[in-house]
Image: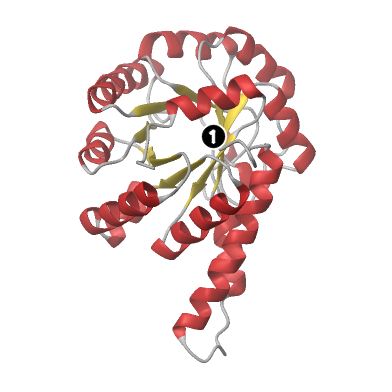
Amino acid sequence: MPCQSAAAMVRAAFAGGYAVPALDIETCDMAEAVLAAAERARTPLIVQITPRTLDRLGWRWLSRHLRDLCDAAPLPVALHLDHATSVEAALRGLDHGFTSVMYDGSHLPPDENARNTAAVAEAARRAGASVEGEIGHVGRDGEPPGLDHLTTADEARAFAAATGVDFLAVAVGTRHGHSPGPGGIDLRRLEEIRDVASVPLVLHGGSGVPDAQLRAAIARGIAKVNVGTALNRAYMGAVDAAAPAPRDVVERAMAAVGAEAERVFALTGSAGAA
């Protein structure tokens, strides 16, 4: 099944009360593992990678290989560029065959963030791709907690209307990396955003969220859940320096990543939706 835009699958999840798992990968074997797990679980899937990883490993060959893997999957799959912090990087993703891109201008003043996101959204529409934006700022390990900025309902409504995004990342208490936000997800804030936003919502920092909170967030409008750190932990936890050959290390790591992916599919309610 050809790789597709993420917009339709996220809208279907929003209407159906589940969330599409959006899994950040850092290597081709991780991509193969999550795609195989998705086929077993019969779930739609968004395979994600960051510009930082592409910068390190090579945009041209890695983008092409990931697109080939996603095109060959017998289920709905989107290839998504996660956290492009410049318009140029987002456009580069579209040029390299990504069917969905996130422009992350959350570090900028809101007006500049909206202008840049709208420009990326226009380019994505011309390419037949979907676009994600972020208003508020979901912090990450290594950043001072004071940089976090929780999204207000008014900000979300205005940003979605001004930019034309297909789905919107909001800051409601999670953080990227190993540590969840100190107070967990602000479910009331999420409800207020859902009630006024015109697009499905995205939760970043899904690895640190307790299961019950994640389900509660999905019930309140989250239709795309990003998970990366948990997959990295699973991969590295399976690496065995005493393994007889590199292929044995990779095999164990892929199995661990696949198992973690299937746990995410069950939590998001997406299993069986493809």
Question: How is the protein colored in the picture?
Answer: secondary structure
- Along the line of sight, the residue nearer the viewer: 20 or 198: 20
The picture places residue 145, in percent across and down from the top left corner, at 59, 39
Is there any visible trace of residue 65 in the rendered image?
yes
Q: Is residue 249 above or below residue 62?
A: below
Q: Is residue 145 above or below residue 232?
A: above
Which quadrant holds residue 97? top left
- Along the line of sight, the residue nearer the viewer: 133 or 128: 128
**Identity of the residue drawn at 29% across and 22% down:** 116
Which quadrant holds residue 153? top right
Residue closest to the far right: 212
**Identity of the residue drawn at 23% across and 44% down:** 96
Is there any visible trace of residue 136 in the rendered image?
no
The picture places residue 91, in percent across and down from the top left corner, at 23, 34
Left or right: where 146 falls relative to 124: right
Q: Which residue is mark 1?
A: 138
**Identity of the residue drawn at 54% across and 60% down:** 232
**Identity of the residue drawn at 61% across and 36% down:** 273
Which quadrant holds residue 28? bottom left
Quarter of the rendering occupied by the C terminus = top right
Dot 1: element: loop
